[in-house]
Image (cartoon, grey):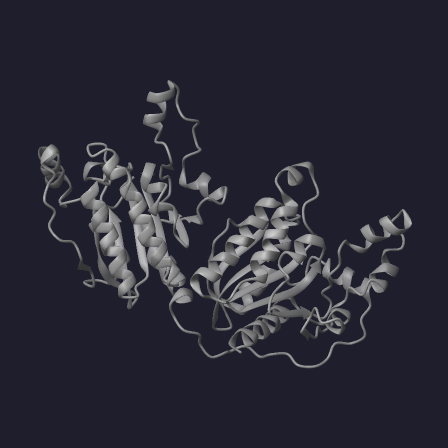
């Protein structure tokens, strides 16, 4: 496979002719000068990283790009100083940072002094992120060791090139230390994406599209609304009827909300993830969206809730509004969930969302069952579709507790005041979107997206 070097990647990602180098000449370390001079001749660069600024579809950005051809992209003190200086300059100039790594980690020729430089790089990046500036990471083959365990793993969004070796301890070192090969298929970009360690796998030539979408949400201002808001009051509410409506397979879900009411979406989870996290623009309003994907038909386990909390923190870090979409059969009930800390994860989601300083909107879209729903509820504004509902258990579960079987579920769906109208009366819901008998998934999704965007714009 032909993998691009640092200069090639810069040409692929940035607007033609826009790159301006920030790098000053490096004085070779005399203790291994010959190796450094040979590396320069071979790689065509004076160090293992290139830094500078350029334009990405007209937007100013800073770039940090590893050159693996220079001593396996290893980071010595000179390279670390170059990275740190570039991060500090990007922060001072209020620039997003695009980093692309390809490195074996710390430079062994320099030992501990180079090793601890990863702390200084990380500190500078955290200061950059603390100002609300985006940090986007692209992991190339291979990225291991201290680079992966520092600036390679601090991105707001992190993707990797296909087939890339990505791992903490390289397989060659593992075999030398332990006398056996590292298990195959673990330290691959695809496996890490499947386990939610990174956000996706992207070809180099597709990077400009991804980066343009991400920066479109993270940097570009809101645009005027284009969708029509739905007015009117909901009709009489029947709890059991609402429960049955929200369980229909053709009812709008979070995917429909993104398909029909959003643009420029960047998914930060795998396609089959139980909880979806995305950077998107709802009717022109940039936001982070977190929601249960009802098409997966899964309860929310500890890992799904951790993913949700990651989305909440991302919104706070970037200063973006947060929209949570509640449409869930509830939190997972299993031995694995209990030992995985399901109750603590629900509590952490509630606490995190309740203390965010960015604007927050919760959209009660369909089923709102138990702790899984509560974890996504505590927003400044709560909007509900007319037939959405919220309950500590599904009505069948409440009936089993109170009456020993599920036969009284329809009765309890009314008695427990779970409907959107009842929730508005008690102050839990602030605004209800009327539904129509002829609503398609598209028409309901558009109405809900328009209302969410309007609330974010207030």
Give x and y (percent) for residue 285.
48, 72
Considering every residue shown, the one lying at the far bottom of the view is 232
Give x and y (percent) for residue 331.
67, 49
Give x and y (percent) for residue 155.
39, 52
Q: Is residue 271 above or below residue 185?
A: below
Q: Is residue 26 above or below residue 260?
A: above
Considering every residue shown, the one lying at the far top of the view is 179
Give x and y (percent) for residue 302.
60, 45
Can residue 144 be seen by looking at this rendering? no
Q: Is residue 104 left or right of residue 300?
A: left
Image quadrant in which you'd find residue 145? top left
- Please state, as top left, top right, bottom left or bottom right, where the N terminus lies in the image: top left
| Marker count (numbered) | 0
Can residue 302 be seen by looking at this rendering? yes
Q: Is residue 15 left or right of residue 215?
A: left
Q: Nearer the viewer, residue 207 or 111?
A: 111
Image quadrant in which you'd find residue 334? top right
Image quadrant in which you'd find residue 94? bottom left
Q: Is residue 47 above or below residue 382?
A: above
């Amino acid at each position: 496979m032909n993998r691009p070097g640092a200069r090639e990647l810069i040409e692929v990602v940035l607007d033609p002719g826009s790159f301006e180098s920030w790098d000053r000449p490096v004085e070779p370390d005399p203790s291994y000068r010959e190796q450094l001079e040979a590396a320069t001749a071979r790689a065509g660069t004076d160090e293992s990283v290139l830094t500078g600024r350029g334009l990405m579809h007209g937007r100013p950005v800073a770039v940090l790009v590893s050159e693996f051809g220079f001593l396996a992209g290893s980071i010595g003190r000179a390279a670390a100083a170059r990275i740190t200086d570039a991060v500090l300059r990007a922060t001072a100039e209020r620039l997003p940072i695009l980093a692309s790594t390809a490195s074996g980690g710390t430079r062994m020729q320099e030992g501990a002094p180079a090793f601890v430089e990863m702390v200084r790089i990380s500190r500078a990046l955290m200061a950059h992120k603390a100002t609300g500036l985006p940090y986007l990471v692209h992991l190339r083959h291979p990225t291991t060791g201290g680079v992966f365990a520092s600036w390679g793993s601090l991105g707001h969004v992190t993707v990797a090139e296909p087939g890339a070796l990505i791992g903490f301890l390289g397989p060659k070192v593992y075999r030398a230390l332990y006398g056996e090969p590292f298990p195959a298929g673990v330290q691959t970009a695809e496996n890490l994406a499947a386990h939610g360690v990174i956000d996706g796998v992207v070809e180099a030539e597709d990077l400009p599209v991804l980066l343009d979408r991400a920066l479109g949400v993270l940097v570009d201002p809101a645009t005027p609304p284009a969708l029509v808001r739905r007015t009117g009051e909901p009709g009489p509410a029947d709890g059991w009827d609402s429960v049955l409506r929200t369980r229909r397979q053709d009812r709008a879900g979070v995917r429909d909300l993104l398909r029909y009411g959003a643009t420029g979406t960047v998914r930060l989870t795998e396609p089959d993830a139980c909880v979806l996290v995305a950077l998107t623009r709802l009717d022109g309003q940039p936001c982070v969206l977190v929601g249960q994907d009802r098409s997966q038909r899964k309860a929310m386990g500890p890992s799904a809730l951790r993913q949700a909390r990651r989305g909440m923190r991302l919104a706070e870090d970037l200063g973006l509004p947060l929209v949570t979409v509640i449409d869930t059969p509830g939190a997972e009930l299993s031995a694995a969930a209990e030992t995985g800390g399901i109750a603590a994860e629900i509590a952490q989601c509630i606490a995190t969302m309740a203390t965010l300083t960015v604007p927050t909107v919760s959209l009660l879209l369909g089923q709102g069952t138990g702790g899984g729903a509560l974890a996504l509820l505590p927003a400044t504004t709560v909007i509900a579709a007319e037939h959405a509902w919220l309950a500590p258990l599904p009505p069948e579960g409440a009936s089993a507790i109170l009456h020993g079987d599920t036969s009284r579920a329809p009765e309890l769906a009314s008695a427990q005041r779970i409907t959107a109208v009842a929730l508005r009366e008690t102050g839990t819901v602030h605004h209800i979107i009327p539904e129509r008998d002829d609503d398609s998934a598209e028409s309901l999704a558009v109405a809900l997206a328009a209302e969410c965007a309007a609330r974010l714009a207030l």
